[in-house]
Amino acid sequence: MSTDFNQELQDRLVHYAAIDSQSDADSPSAPSTEIQFDMLNLLKTELNEIGAQDVTLTDYGVVLATIPGTVPGPTIGFLAHVDTAPQFNATGVKPRVIKGYNGGDITFPDDPELVLSPTEHPYLATKQGHDLITASGATLLGADDKAGVSIIMTMARHLLNNPDIQRGPIRIAFTPDEEIGRGVGPQLPKDLGADFAYTLDGSDVGEIEYESFSADGAVVTITGVSIHPGWAKEKLVNAIHLASKIVQTLPQATMTPETTDGREGFIHATDMTGGSSEMKLKFILRDFEMEGLEAKGELLCQVCAAVQASEPRASITCEITPQYRNMRYWLEKNMAPVKLAHAATKAQGIEPVSIPIRGGTDGSRLTEFGVPTPNIFTGMQCIHGPKEWISVQDMATATDVCLSVVQLAAEK
């Protein structure tokens, strides 16, 4: 497509990224943080301003809107999440634009020792001449997934301003709490009202993903025996020591995120909190197949049982909770949305690539709930950390692919 979306996409992402909207897995509320409403309310206002219909902010924190169709056709959903990852500082994000990237190392004003190098990140080496957006070195950027938000908003404005473009009905959803696995509840599929949908939450140009991890979360609680340390001999049971023993007994050279790739799953210790009387350990369990996921849960439980047996005066519990499942289990039975996205990518002169996501998206849950939802690239790179960056031109390509999806679906 010939339309130049670069400036709009740049302006939107710079604006959105500066808004703190981090989620919090320890919060029971929905959304998990009040600050996410700063993004949700802004998007509700902007959708009304560009002329979208049925603009709603639901009581569970999702912004929904309609772009009316101009021809009969399936209703297509487009989704992105407004929250940013809790793993790294996301307060005080200062987005900056690097115009016409020269191909060299990128440094950061708020952390002069931090370097983003094309030698270390080969994808960066392919973006010479592009306009890049990064943060300042002290925070993540939040392109995950405010790039997706920017792309969907740019597409929506373009379609509403160009009623001559043939399209079926389009539904838009901006969700909270995706980063903590709570972005899609059982009510959303009905409220979205789409025949199929796409999340805009992928990375490299050309990636159309329809396979994700299956995921469980685990909380291990260790209760020791507390007593004054001066009188503790043969009485004190230190929960910290038992927690450390559990972590050390689990595989270290294999089955951790830093030792696995491709189709290998992992057990990842994410949090250790507490004191000598009680400790809580949090884990995420990941595998592409249910058998592998269940085996990892059984291994964690076995380790807890073994440490419990070594100290019967303590109490050790392991609670495993399902999070999301591999979207492939459902999409392989209905590959039409994937094939449509492949065709739309090829229409932009790009060869589509479908590789498993070593993570999950809102599409994982939405697909499980009955709305087939593959994932489309945005260009985001080095997410969840201070080196996060994205090419404006990659975002523009993703916008063109989304518009091609809409037009190809209308033609069919």
Image (cartoon, rainbow, N blue to C red):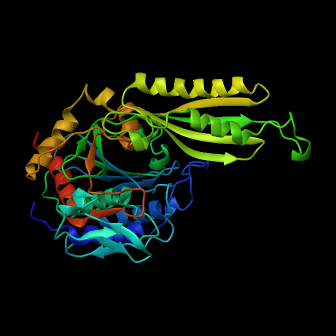
Residue extending farthest to the right is 231
Q: Is residue 342 above or below residue 131?
A: above
Q: In which quarter of the image is the C terminus?
A: top left
Q: In this orientation, does residue 380 appear?
A: yes
Rendered location of residue 77, percent (x, y):
30, 45
Q: Quadrant of residue 111?
A: bottom left
Compared to 246, does 312 lie above or below?
above
Which one is in front, 2 or 313? 313
Residue depicted at 27% across the width and 75% down the height: 98
The N terminus lies in quadrant: bottom left
Percent x, y for residue 37?
A: 51, 60
Q: Where residue 291 appears, x then y in whole percent?
A: 41, 21
Count the labels in the image: 0
- Above or below, 33 against 13 in this view is above
Q: Answer with left or right where residue 320 lies relative to residue 53.
A: right
| Residue extending farthest front | 233
Residue 400 occupies which quadrant of the picture? bottom left
Q: Note whether residue 135 is visible.
A: no
Please give left or right for residue 242 compared with residue 213 in the image: right
Return the x and y of residue 369 as percentages of the image width and height.
40, 32
- Closer-to-camera residue (150/211): 211
Q: What residue do we see at 82% from left, 36% from top?
A: 225
Q: Which of 61/258 is in front? A: 258
The residue at 49%/71% (across/down) is: 92
